[in-house]
Image: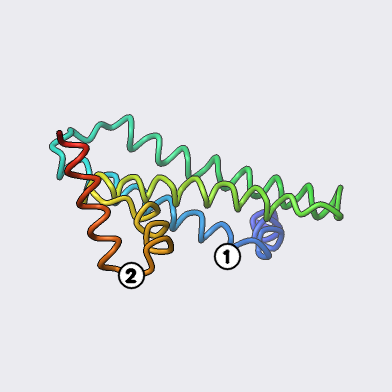
């Protein structure tokens, strides 16, 4: 029992990072499942198992990076760098799912918004891209 308390005490500084990564994994799973249903692609148990293993592996990697940073090399922020890469990967996957659901890539729309300067310009340019891609 005391080992469980020791483990919880050890990971308490990174609980918010682990929660955030878990949240991103769940959002990715939900948007991926919704995209599959919308596009009539069957949801396979292998994909669900992949999500579960991703949850445990990502959190173990974050914990390992935290321990490395805390007890061995304090000068390099391993935990933040690794958590950042994992978060970027999950956000990229969420945006891909959004594109599969709605047919709009939010990242391209944002870049187009900065180039065009208006929402109307973004909508026009994206509709022109659709017309040229369907020909």
Image marks 2 and 1: residues in contact by CB distance under 8 Å: no
Residue at the (73%, 49%) spot, across then down: 78
Residue at the (52%, 50%) spot, across then down: 88
Nearer-N-terminus badge (2/1): 1
Q: Nearer the viewer, residue 111 or 93?
A: 111
Residue 16 is marked as 1
Residues packed near mark 2 inside 10 Å, few (<14), some (14 to 19) or many (20 plus): few
Give the quadrant of the N terminus: bottom right
In the image, residue 121 lies at what x, y percent?
28, 63
Could you tell me how far apart the alpha carbons at marks 2 and 1 are, in whole angstroms?
A: 36 Å
From what the image shows, is residue 123 above or below residue 96? below
Residue at the (16%, 36%) spot, across then down: 134
The tally of labels here is 2
Mark 1 element type: helix
Depth-wise, is mark 2 or mark 1 nearer the camera? 2
Give the quadrant of the C terminus: top left
Mark 2 element type: loop
In the image, residue 113 lies at what x, y percent?
37, 63
In the image, residue 37 lies at what x, y percent?
16, 43
**Residue for badge 2:** 118
Residue at the (42%, 57%) spot, across then down: 111
Q: Nearer the viewer, residue 112 or 20?
A: 112
Q: Nearer the viewer, residue 16 or 9?
A: 16
């Amino acid at each position: 029992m005391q080992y469980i308390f020791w483990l919880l005490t050890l990971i308490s500084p990174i609980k918010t990072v682990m929660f955030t990564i878990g949240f991103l994994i769940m959002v990715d799973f939900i948007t991926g499942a919704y995209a599959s249903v919308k596009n009539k692609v069957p949801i396979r148990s292998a994909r669900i198992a992949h999500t579960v293993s991703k949850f445990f592996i990502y959190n173990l990697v974050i914990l390992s990076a935290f321990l490395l940073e805390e007890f061995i090399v304090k000068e390099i922020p391993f935990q933040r760098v690794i958590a950042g890469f994992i978060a970027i990967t999950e956000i990229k996957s969420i945006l891909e799912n959004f594109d599969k659901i709605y047919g709009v890539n939010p990242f391209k729309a944002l870049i187009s918004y900065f180039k065009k300067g208006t929402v109307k310009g973004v909508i026009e340019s994206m509709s022109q891209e659709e017309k040229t891609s369907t020909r």
